[in-house]
């Protein structure tokens, strides 16, 4: 346990909200950690489900926060969706764009022709979020989808945070069209694989570490793409939700922050009927996990995850155990 965690990878694919920033402010230490990747020979990509802002707009915001970013290192679901669509229809095909100007630009960049009405007889539809969308836009989408057009959704986030609270996201609008037509779209964004594989293809990397704060999007998506995942504990999910996660959403690593990328990651090893991580020890007893470590110790959670997940290797739904802490050295 002497080399840094990041040394096993050729890139970091970082989520944004909860990883790099929280609201308008950078997460302490995150920009500095990301700045160090280049000197370590590690490539960096930002992967986001946002389909309404251009890559340059996102990159500019990141630079303002002190994080290294260019338009070429920002991969949104609009780009992934347009590239996915380009592989499904002939060049110069008409595509009904239900979404932002940024989404239309991405479609155009793939040598496809954006249109705004089902009367234009599009062969495909791409649907992404834009706050200006209304019933007429969804109706045009439904008309084209019901007529047999190829249908791609940039992402299916059901909600989107706003200053006044939680509002319907693109997934809610996609669900309305699905309910009207009886069809389901192909999805480019998290938690599906195309967003991650698009970033890997453009950067020319094969061993990225996907770092995110949400199990149901970042970690599930990275796992689906076949990449190693790390849950960073600066956002939505916690060690407790990771412990309870269904199999598909379980991260490979638990890290407290991005600075931990440069630290050795402790081995988790089996010791008899228990698992040890550092000085912490964890074992499964019935429907509980007993952890011998100071309460909330991260190594304790790492050992607990290994023990509980081995006992429940194929969990299609979350399984929440009782957690019992015993202060001690784990010996």
Image (cartoon, rainbow, N blue to C red):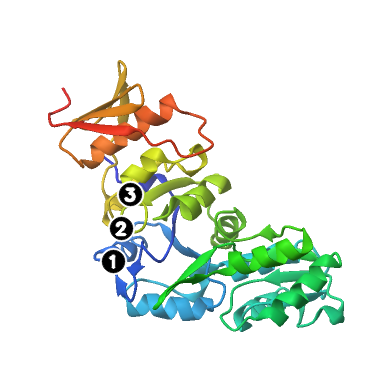
Q: Quadrant of the C terminus?
A: top left
**Tag 1's secondary structure?**
loop
Task: Return the x and y of residue 293 as percentages of the image width and height.
Answer: 17, 33
The part of the image, by quadrant, that contains residue 27 is bottom left
Q: How many marks?
A: 3
The part of the image, by quadrant, that contains residue 132 is bottom right
**Tag 3's secondary structure?**
loop
- Whether residue 172 sits left or right of residue 139 in the image: it is left
- What residue is shown at x 75% (from left), y 76% (from top)? 139
| Labelled pair 3, 2 in contact (Cβ < 8 Å) | no
Label whose residue precedes the other's in the sequence (2 or 1):
1
- What residue is shown at x 51% (from left), y 39% (from top)? 317
Is residue 94 visible in the rendered structure shown here? yes
| Labelled pair 2, 1 in contact (Cβ < 8 Å) | yes
Name the residue carrying label 2.
Answer: 234
Name the residue carrying label 3.
Answer: 238
- Whether residue 295 sits left or right of residue 97 in the image: it is left
Is residue 111 visible in the rendered structure shown here? no
**Tag 2's secondary structure?**
loop
User: Considering depth in this image, is 114 or 291 the residue closer to the camera?
Assistant: 291
Name the residue carrying label 1.
Answer: 27
User: Considering depth in this image, is 21 or 322 the residue closer to the camera?
Assistant: 322
Task: Return the x and y of residue 220 as percentages of the image width and height.
Answer: 51, 48
**Gap between marks 3 and 2, in whole Å?**
9 Å
Label whose residue precedes the other's in the sequence (3 or 1):
1
**Gap between marks 3 and 1, in whole Å?**
16 Å
Circle 2 Cα neighbour tier, 10 Å, few/some/many (<14 / 14–19 / ≥20): many
Task: Return the x and y of residue 288 as percentages of the image width and height.
Answer: 32, 28
Task: Return the x and y of residue 258 as percentages of the image width and height.
Answer: 31, 57
| Camera-side mark, 3 or 1 | 3
| Camera-side mark, 3 or 2 | 3
Q: Residue furthest top?
A: 272
């Amino acid at each position: 346990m002497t080399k840094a965690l990041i040394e096993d990878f050729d890139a970091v694919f970082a989520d944004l909200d909860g990883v790099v920033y929280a609201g308008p402010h950078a997460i302490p230490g995150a920009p500095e950690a990301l700045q160090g990747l280049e000197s370590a020979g590690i490539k960096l990509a930002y992967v986001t489900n946002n389909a309404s802002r251009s890559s340059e707009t996102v990159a500019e915001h990141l630079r303002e926060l002190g994080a290294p970013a260019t338009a070429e290192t920002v991969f949104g679901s609009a780009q992934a969706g347009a590239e996915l669509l380009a592989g499904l229809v002939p060049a110069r095909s008409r595509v009904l764009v239900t979404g932002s100007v940024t989404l239309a630009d991405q479609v155009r960049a793939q040598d496809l022709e954006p249109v705004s009405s089902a009367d234009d007889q599009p062969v495909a539809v791409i649907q992404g979020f834009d706050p200006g969308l209304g019933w007429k836009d969804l109706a045009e989408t439904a008309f084209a989808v019901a007529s047999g057009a190829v249908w791609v959704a940039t992402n299916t986030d059901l909600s989107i945070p706003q200053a006044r609270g939680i509002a319907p996201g693109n997934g809610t609008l996609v669900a309305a069209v699905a309910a009207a037509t009886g069809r389901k779209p192909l999805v480019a964004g998290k938690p599906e694989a195309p967003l991650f594989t698009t970033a890997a293809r453009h950067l020319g990397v094969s061993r990225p570490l996907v770092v995110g704060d949400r199990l149901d999007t970042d970690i599930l998506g990275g796992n689906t793409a076949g990449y190693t995942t790390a849950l960073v504990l600066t956002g939505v999910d916690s060690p407790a939700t990771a412990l309870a996660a269904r199999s598909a959403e379980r991260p490979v690593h638990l890290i407290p922050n991005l600075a931990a990328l440069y630290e050795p990651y402790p081995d988790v090893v089996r010791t008899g009927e228990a698992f040890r991580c550092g000085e912490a020890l964890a074992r499964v007893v019935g429907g509980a996990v007993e952890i011998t470590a100071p309460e909330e110790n991260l190594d304790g959670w790492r050992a607990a995850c290994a023990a509980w997940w081995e006992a429940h290797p194929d969990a299609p739904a979350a399984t929440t155990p009782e957690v019992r802490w015993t202060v001690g050295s784990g010996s």
